[in-house]
Structure formats: C-alpha cells, structure tokens
Amino acid sequence: MMDKYLIWLSQIKGVGPVLQKKLLEAFECPEAVFHADKAELKSVPGVGAATAESILNSKSLEKAEGILEKAEKLKIKILTCHDPLYPELAKTLPRSPLVLYYLGNIKENSMGVCIVGARRCTNYGKTVTREAAGFLAKEGIPVISGLAKGIDSYAHTSCIKNEGYTLAFVASGVDICYPKEHRELREAVINNGAVISQFPPNTSAKANHFPVRNYLMSAWAFNVLVVEAGEKSGSLITAKLASEQGKQVLAVPNNIYSPEGRGTNLLIAKGAEIYLKERQLLMNQDKGFAAAENKRESNHVKKNVKRNLEVQETLSPIEKKISELIAEKPQQIEKLSLLFSDRLSFLETISLMELEEKIERLPGGMIRKSR
C-alpha cells in the first residue's frame, strides 16, 4: 500500500521533507526507499553514512500501520504528495511534507489568503480581521489560519458566518483540540472546510511544532495578512516564511505605541505591503505558480549571498549561546537543553534557527551550524 510506505518515510527521525523528496526522486517510490541497501541510500545527495544507517534502522512498517489504523478508527483522512487535492504550489515547496492528515473536506483549488495575528488582540485587530475574512468568504476565496486564540479564531469565525470555506492548520494531531476552548470552533471549521496537520493522530501540540505549522499555513496561501503582532510574535515567522516562498505579505498599520502593533509596523518598515483596503487581498490570485516560483528563486539567491551577515545581525542572546555551544562540533539537543533554564524557549529557538537555516538537524537528535 503506497500510503503505508509514504507514512513510513515521513516518520524517520532525522530525515526531513527536503531529504525525503530527494529519496523519492532517486528511487521513484517510497517502497523502493524501504528496500534500498546502504550503498544505494548513500548514492543520494545529502545522505551520508549516519543518515543511511538511521534509515536502515527504521525498516519497520509497524509504526506506519499503527498510524493508518488510528486514522481509520478516528475517520481521519490522509492527503499525500500524489493526491491532486494537494495544491501544486504548496507541495513543491522544499519543506512541505509528503503526508498530511485532515478532518473535513479539502476541495480543489483550496489555496487562499492566510490571516494571522496576535492571540491577545485589540478591538481594532478584531474588526480588521472580521472584515477581511468576511470579504474573502463572499469572494469565494479560502481563509487560511491556525485555530489559535485571538486573530486566528476571528478569521475562521467570520469566514464561516459569511458562508465561506476555511482551513485550519494545527500543531498537533487533528484529533486533538488545541486550545481546548476551541472545540466548537474546530467542529465548525471541519464542517465548513478542514483541519489539517502533518502530525499523525494522537500527537500533542509542542513548541517546536508551531513553526512547522506556520510553514504550511504560508505554503497554502497566495497572500499573507498579518493583522497584529508583537515584536516576537509567531506571526512574524509566518510572514518571513511566506516572503521566502515568494508570497505577498500585507501588514496592518498600527499605533506606534501599541505593543500589539510593533510587529506589523516593523514588517511595513522592512518592505511589507501596507494593508489599507480589502481589495488588496485579491492580489496574486491569478498569477499562478510561475510568478511565485521566480520570486522564491530570487529570494533564495539573495539569502545565500547575505546569510552570513544576516546571521550575525539577527542573533538573539539565546541564539548566540546556542551558536557558541555548537561552534566546534555537533551537539545533542537533549544535553544542550540542560544548559538553559527555560527549556521551552530553548526548543522554540532551535526550531526557529532551523527554519532560518542557521542550524541543521542530524540523526540522533544532534544539531550543528549550517554549512
């Protein structure tokens, strides 16, 4: 069964979507990857001896079969990279997963506009969100968000009230409601769209899952609207990812003294489109894959040229400490975490640094500085 082998490939520790896709390209199907020997695996660019060994040590379908059984029992549907319902523009991005799990209905042409913002939002933010999501619903454009408190919840709710279609990407298994207060909203999203995750059933929400969730939200969007965001908001991560993916980022201008507006004002200062009217949300809907692909390639070239300088300029204190600790050789994440008083912040920072390509993960729970 094809899904079984794809799920197996997607669950190998230390082998992320980028390498999974390289393996699929080399062997043409996941079953062939499963049966490959060490020499064959090492012939794939990016697969060293340690990674090949990790793949060989993972040659059991028990976990994949268990995931399939849970999904069937919970009526969770599976979307793979071979499914035409997986938007081409989303699945061709390097870090988009091979396998997604969902409840509800994924329709054709499900890409839309991603609306994100602060959990602790103001009345101003709520109003902008309601109007934007309502407008998109009436235009027949899917509203993408993350089912979180604050702006996310207002985006989903307004879309549904206006008889629109909405998708919620979550940082847990789709069978788990996080936050718990959103049980009714989650059910409403399922009935008017879908709740989607790359994490298998029974997976709890964790700090390092949220940047991965944000990548998918931006991947599924033509445009991203950031309504309100603090200086360290996860919404800024979504905006950064969207920009790297070649998507249009719009930011709502705010009072310069408002903590909830510092992040959006900063985005505008760095070149994000100032959001002033709802018609702006229709930009890029008809540009298709080529325009976004060209912009993404251009961003990639610029990023490679400037990366060393940017890393030096943007490292936070915790990032600097991590960089110093792994400067000489790779280190195990679990051991590094013992050196930090706030373990959750450490894990979240590790995830952000990986997304920003400041570090890279290795098999065995190790990390090293990006080369």
Image (cartoon, grey):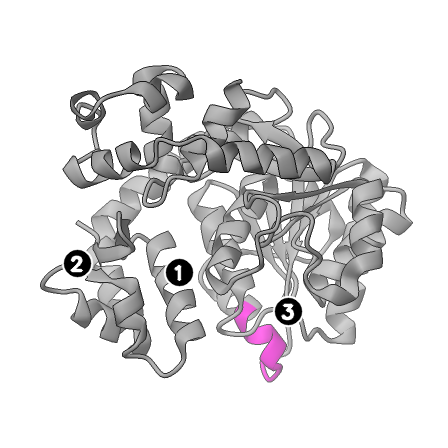
Q: Mark 1 points at which residue?
A: 352
Of residues 208 and 280, which is closer to you in this image? 208
Task: Name the residue: 63% across, 34% down.
Answer: 69
Q: Name the residue under label 2.
A: 330
Q: Can residue 71 be seen in this view?
A: yes
Compare marks 1 and 2 and give the one earlier in the sequence: 2
Decide whether the magenta segment is chiefly helix, strand or loop. Answer: helix
Compare marks 2 and 3 and give the one earlier in the sequence: 3
Nearer the observer, disc 2 or disc 3? 2
Distance from Cα at disc 1 to Cα at disc 3: 18 Å
Looking at the rendered structure, the kind of residue marked 1 is Leu
Q: Dot 2: what SS?
A: loop
Q: Dot 1: what SS?
A: helix
Q: Dot 3: what SS?
A: loop
Distance from Cα at disc 2 to Cα at disc 3: 35 Å
Nearer the observer, disc 1 or disc 2? 2
Q: Name the residue under label 3.
A: 118
Horizontal and vertical percent position of residue 168: 69, 48
Horizontal and vertical percent position of residue 80: 55, 27
Looking at the rendered structure, the kind of residue marked 2 is Pro
Horizontal and vertical percent position of residue 317: 30, 78
Q: Give the range drawn in magenta.
A: 256-263
Mark 1–mark 2 contact, CB under 8 Å? no
